[in-house]
Amino acid sequence: MRLHTGLASLGALLLPLASAQSPGGTGSSNVTSSLGPDENGFYWIFSEGLSAAFIPYGASIAKLLIHDKYGVERDIVAGFDNATAYELDAAHPHLGGVPGRYANRIRNSTFEIDGETYHTNANENPTAEAPDGADTLHGGHNGWDFRNFTVIAHSNDSITFSIVDSDGEQGFPGEVISYITYTVHDLTWDFKMVAIATTEKTPIMLSSHTYWNLDGFANNETNTALNHTFYLPYSGQRVGVDNILIPTGDIVANPKGSVNDFWSAPKQLGTDLQSAEAEGNCGFNCTGYDTCWIINRGQDGPYDWRAEGGYVARLQSAWSGIQVDVYTDQEAFQMYSCNGQNATMPLKTTQGLSGDGDGDFPRTIPQYGCVVMEVEDWIDGINHPEWQRESRQIFSPGGDPYVLQASYVFSINDTATA
């Protein structure tokens, strides 16, 4: 991979800014050159309340350790015990990685810029007419979370990865250089993603594709995450999709009390899954969630996304007491309730029950055993000019870079409702 000298300098300028300023923290750190991967290939960062491990493959988070309400340390993200396993897993469920260059789905694996049509690598929903797939998911067969990033900075509480995505890769025009920085402080995980179009106008939309279970998969009452309470205070609307989850162009209301209503009050993820409305909610023959909600923060006027109490999503488990509030500068939020998990994904040694005791659950992740939360922009916005998302999804050489910022603020809240 080649790196332009001028762009490397720009990257160096971006690095001091590469940790999102979250409520109550600065995200600053002192670089320690002696740090490196442990015996399992993990790069660790630490704060007073969190320990997090990352790998170059997909710039992925591999472990996130936090103490629950009992003082027991829980690893609350899905993954593997060794970094090499991520590249060997044939299922590749995008575990903890950064999907790119364009996250989520692209209708018909095509888009248009300035009158020119581009064809991206199709990799989902194959049909007789389109044997490779009817759409592109998370950037194609060789999307960013299938590739090894370069570690360019690592300290006790922060790590920065970089990738150069070449012109034409997976069908996308122009070269893109990206920097992904993760930082922890106190009980907060910050990340900032910066991507620069260097040669041609191109679409860019990134996210973090982390699989969460706030019980550390150790709840002895249930092995699913349907007991988790979810809240989206600014999301009375969602992106309408067809039966293979491709946006139709419609922005759909979530009436109070409906399956997709998480705005009027917090509710457990499993509350409405027995209702007829839940059938097909996540696509053909699928009951659950794989839904993109619109974040309507502007309804109350100008806002600072970092302001305390201004979280756009909250996930909480009364069993462990662990709660996470998500703050972001993005304007959409995808939640996936792990409808496709089928008990073939193993737990890590840092997770779950022993598996030996009478009544213990199997040491695998079942359907609904986790939750994916993705901060991003409106999905497939590049194919819906009527949404007017171009300034947030199409980027040009010499123009503003793509920037995504988010803070995941953890706390202990063991009440039955969040």
Image: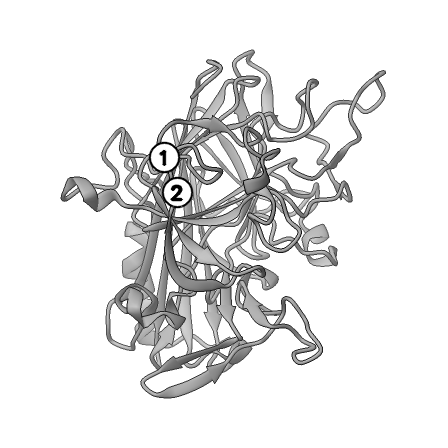
Residue 318 x %, y %: 52, 18
Does the CB distance between marks 2 and 1 fall below 8 Å?
Answer: yes
Residue 271 x %, y %: 55, 28
Can residue 389 be seen?
no
Q: Which residue is mark 1?
A: 263
Hey, which quadrant is residue 363 in on the image?
A: top right
Quick one: label 1, few (<14), some, or many (20+) residues within 10 Å? many
Quadrant into which the C terminus falls: top left
Could you tell me which residue is drawn at 48 percent across and 61 percent down? 103
Hey, which quadrant is residue 140 in on the image?
A: bottom right
Tell me: residue 260, above or below residue 382.
above
Tell me: residue 263, above or below residue 173.
above
Mark 1 residue type: Trp
Mark 2 residue type: Asn
Is 66 positioned to the left or the right of 380 in the image?
right
Foreground disc of the pair 2, 1: 2
Hey, which quadrant is residue 186 in on the image?
A: top left
Q: How is the image coloured?
A: one colour
Quick one: label 2, few (<14), some, or many (20+) residues within 10 Å? some
Residue 99 x %, y %: 51, 59
Number of disc labels:
2
Q: Which residue is mark 2?
A: 254
Q: Secondary structure at mark 2?
A: loop
Is 404 positioned to the left or the right of 1 in the image?
left
Could you tell me which residue is drawn at 46 percent across and 65 percent down? 102
Can residue 279 be seen?
yes
The dot on residue 141 is none
Could you tell me which residue is drawn at 73 percent across and 32 percent down? 349
